[in-house]
Image (cartoon, helix red, strand yellow):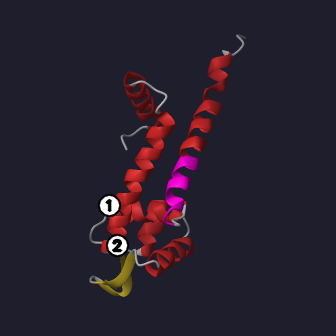
Amino acid sequence: MDSPDPAQAQTGDLVMAVARRVRRAHLEALSHWQVTPSQSRALRVLASRPDGMRPSALADELHIAPRSATEVADALEERGWARRAPDPTDRRATILALTEAGRDLVARVDVVRRRASADVLDVLTPDQRRTLHEILTVVVGEEL
């Protein structure tokens, strides 16, 4: 049996190290607004749904328990970034949607998050970035 290539054996560790660096940079960027990572993800999902969505659908989208989605929704509502309204198709249900302040925050956070990611990857040449993007797209299995 051939011994594994040392570089190949370390690839997973390197991917995880880059992910941690990017995550730390994102957390620092979010700290300006006191936005938690779960709130940030929820804001981004809600931003993709201009008409809003039920909290249960948000839980499904975020792969979290419905109770956790309720807590995230409560926090977003308390901060004025989202609002609940009756679901027009079912009086017993509610729809969660971003407020104008929430949409504005998502736009500002996205700019800062992109900048934070770019800062981490700034050591790469443009060609290296394109290659990394192509490789990660294949590994992840979809275009983000």
Q: Which residues are magenta?
A: 23-33
Where is the N terminus found, in terms of image quarters? top right
In this view, the residue farthest toward the bottom is: 91
Inspect the image, locate mark 2, and give the three-letter code of the amino acid beneath it: Ala
- x 38%, y 22%: residue: 127
Front in this rendered view, residue 83 or 52: 83
Inspect the image, locate mark 1, and give the three-letter code of the amino acid beneath it: Ser
Q: Nearer the viewer, mark 1 or mark 2?
A: 2
Image x and y of residue 100, in percent: 30, 73
- x 34%, y 84%: residue: 85
| Observer able to see residue 125 | yes
Q: Which mark is residue 48?
A: 1
Q: Quadrant of residue 128?
A: top left
Q: Is residue 83 magenta?
A: no
Front in this rendered view, residue 5 or 16: 16
Image x and y of residue 49, in percent: 31, 65
- x 39%, y 40%: residue: 142
Residue neighbourhood size for the residue with mark 1, other residues' Cα within 10 Å, grouped as few (<14), some (14–19), many (≥20) = few
Image x and y of residue 35, in percent: 51, 65
- Which comes before the other along the chain, label 1 or label 2? 1
Residue neighbourhood size for the residue with mark 2, other residues' Cα within 10 Å, grouped as few (<14), some (14–19), many (≥20) = few
SS majority, magenta? helix
Q: Which mark is residue 89?
A: none
Q: Is residue 27 magenta?
A: yes
Instruction: Look at mark 2 in the image and give the residue it sits on.
Output: 101
In the depicted structure, whether residue 18 falls above or below residue 107: above
- Mark 1 falls on what kind of element? loop
| Observer able to see residue 63 | no
